[in-house]
Image: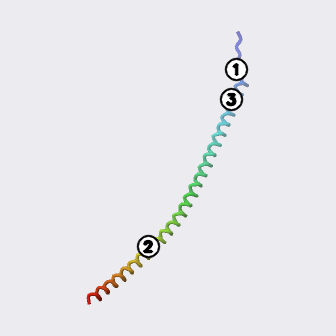
Amino acid sequence: MSFSFPDASAESGSARRLSDDDEAGESVRRHEFNFYKARQAATGRELAQSVTEVSKGLVFVKKGLADVVAARENFEERLLQQLADLETSLRAETTSREE
């Protein structure tokens, strides 16, 4: 009965394969992480661009609302003046009819 020791070179080869597998796995993880970072950065830029567009839109809406408020106030002032003129005319008419 003969007994043989395991071949040391075979163990070295399998250790080398494990090391290569670890390096390959690390490389894949690094690439995945870099991809994730790039995707997050792109998403951040897209969100920043969207916020900028919304801000510009809000400025436009604010200006439009200010114009509407000014027009409404102008209309209200003219309407009140016309009502005052009408009231004065009616009072003058009723006064002249009473005499």
SS category of the residue bearing label 3: helix
The residue mark sitting in front, 2 or 1, is 2
User: Which residue in the protein does label 1 denote?
Assistant: 6
What residue sits 58% from the left and 51% below the top?
43
What residue sits 36% from the left and 82% below the top?
86
Sequence order check, earlier mark of 3 and 2: 3
Q: Nearer the viewer, residue 21 or 2?
A: 21
Is 84 located above or below residue 20 in the figure? below
Q: Residue furthest left?
A: 98
Report whether 91 appears left or right of 82: left
What residue sits 65% from the left and 39% below the top?
28
User: Which residue in the protein does label 2 denote?
Assistant: 72
Report whether 2 appears left or right of 67: right
Sequence order check, earlier mark of 3 and 1: 1
What residue sits 32% from the left and 83% below the top?
90
Q: Nearer the viewer, residue 93 or 43?
A: 93
C-alpha separation, residue under disc 3 versus residue under disc 1: 14 Å
Q: Nearer the viewer, residue 3 or 78?
A: 78
Q: Amino acid at mark 2?
A: Arg
C-alpha separation, residue under disc 2 versus residue under disc 1: 97 Å
**Which mark is on residue 15?**
3
